[in-house]
Image (cartoon, grey):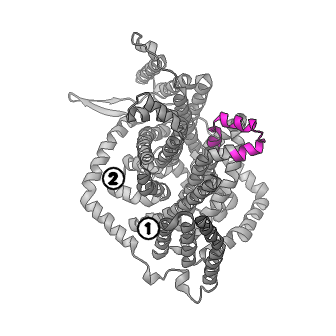
Amino acid sequence: MAEPQAQARRASAWPLVWALALAFALALYLMRDQIPWANAWPESDALPFAPWLSAMMAWLKVNFTWATRAIAAVLDVPLEVTFGLLAKPTKLVLAGTSFMVPTLSWAGVIAAGIIAGHAAGGRRLALLIAACLGYIALFGQWQSAMLSLALIVIAVPLCVIVGLLLGILAWRSPRIEKLAVTPLLDLMQTIPTFAYLIPMLILFGNSPVSAMIATSIFATPPMVRATMVALSRVPAEIGDFAVMAGCTPRQRLWRVLIPTARPMLMVGVNQVIMLALNMVIISSMIGAGGLGYDVLLALRALKIGQGMEAGLAIVVLAIALDRLSQAFASKGGAPVHHAQRSLLARHPHLVLALTVLLLTTLASLVLPVFAKFPPGWTLSTAPWWKAAVDWITVHFFDWIEAFRVALLLYVLNPMRAFCEGFPWLGALVLLALAGYRLGGWRLAGLVGLLVLFCASCGLWEKTMSTVYLCGVSAIIALLIGIPIGVWASRSDRVFGFIEPIVDTLQTLPSFCFIIPIVMLFRVGDVTALIATVSFAIVPAIRYTNHGLRQVPPTLIEAAKTAGCTRRQTFWRVQLPMALPEVLLGLNQTILLSLSMIIICAMIGTRDLGQEVFIALAKADAGRGIVAGLAIAFIGIVADRLIGGASAAARKRLG
């Protein structure tokens, strides 16, 4: 009896504690002129993290470049082979004679894609693959698309393998997950890619290998998180059955648990493909080339049409890869013993695809039409894109301007002013108190140290400006995305309509739709808000839909049998069961909002993204890494506090 009474007394005291903490923070805010050191960390006392990191990078360059360049040389081998097959003819020298090995014919690649689509998903998928690859060829994007595909073909399997193994390690050891894997994932996904472009160039050189490593750093975390969630969601009875059947631990994992968790694992593969393709523009800045470079050139010249065509080529390439991978993963089927059958009988589609590739490639040696898509066959919609934006600007300028000004004056500017003026000491007290309430002293200490870093490095005002923009964007994305995910989970027709839109939003490079948004709303916070919401809304929709669809039908039937209404079934059964996936979507939404910070810096925002961009322009590795760490720590604080709140809520609900 004594313990419940003590807990009740402590719980009743928390409102008073929160009131005192809020009063303290408010007093600091109102007295910021009298005690300026509590509002913004004095510049003279700022800790020199940036010079320290710059010195460390210089030391690494002197002492370890030989090792990193050796790693780059090893990784360059599969890349060069893939480039030779898809994009660039390879020169071979045999017995003193040199000759060029042609790339695979565009016609053969399209035919092989159609055959693969038919093998995996039938006529409908074959038609989709034909449409995607046909678009790339017809709009003159084939050569660039093959350069990007060559990089993706190596980077995505690397991300999936590393992510799967790290996820298994974290699932087996909660201690490793908590102390090492989760913080590493947060840093990998929240530090802006621009922040580590300079170290990549210093250590690995300006080459496609640097681009592949940068892509892998950004695209691997969703696979790790999906693996952890997928394995933890496998019913314990299935693992027990495997043990009773005599499976070894390795057999239990790879032959029982992994196949059972395949639907959620494929969500991780989907995210890896999407994020890898979303990196193609940034990767093009350090030697990747391909579609990303085409988009970058078009945007520098403000050619919206050419930029949109190259951006849509990235989208259709992502859709083709995603649908193929999903179809092959879900195909499965029982094993068939066919030791006496020929290769053609066992794998007719594979033999046919290889034959077509060989014949069309040989034909390309004598028929130029097979070697390169004829320029006279290409199309262009560039004038239409420009005309559409011009028409909207002419006819709806007054409405758009009124919306932009009202949003700025009455919502965004007041929120920005409040956040930028909020004292670091007040934020530290409030967030550390929230950490203690949700996770005890350890979480309170972690949150306090991360907030202290952001203040002591002299970037507090820009940190709070980042919090303002990302916070507003993430909230709007969640308010829109979760209801759409719920709606899609209840109707296959709705899901079929929403899925290509979601794929387009996530794979269309942010640079592409920033240009028309800038032309309509001009540079500033409104444009940054729209771009960030468009990019960050995808995980909220995707994970909510997937989580609700994975609820066992037997539980829903049991709820209906017990007399639950549709609303009660949703709130009491489906949503609690789907909570891990929904929370994963929440986590990804926040992290993707933060990943847009550097892009937003290019359109007029004044925050940590601008600091990273300035560091990149000046090749100041230390300054860029410090700003990137500050962005990452914002994401880690939000992730830990939200995780603690959700765990407490689930504990209360039982």
Q: Which of marks 2 and 1 is in front?
A: 1
Pick out the residue farthest to the left.
95
Identify the amino acid type marked 1.
Val
Magenta part of the chain = 544-572
Count of numbered marks: 2
Q: Residue 157 carries which label?
A: none
Q: Is residue 249 above or below residue 457?
A: above
User: Residue 628: horizontal and vertical position, in percent?
Assistant: 47, 63
Q: Give the image quarter of residue 375.
A: top right
Residue shown at the point (57%, 29%) measured from the top left: 129
Residue toward you, 273 or 404: 273
Are dots 2 and 1 in contact, CB under 8 Å? no
Q: Which mark is residue 626?
A: 1
Residue toward you, 221 or 157: 221
Q: Is residue 187 left or right of residue 533?
A: left
Tag 2 residue: 204
Pick out the residue farthest to the bottom.
34
Q: Is residue 28 left or right of residue 88?
A: right
Identify the amino acid type marked 2.
Phe
Q: Give the image quarter of residue 590.
A: bottom right
Which secondary structure dominates the residues rendered in magenta?
A: helix
Residue toward you, 606 or 442: 442
Quadrant of the drawing holding the N terminus: bottom right
Asked which secondary structure carries label 2, the reply is: helix
User: Residue 160: horizontal and vertical position, in percent?
Assistant: 45, 41
Residue 635 colored in magenta in the image: no
Residue toward you, 259 or 489: 259
First in sequence: mark 2 or mark 1? Answer: 2
Residue 567 colored in magenta in the image: yes
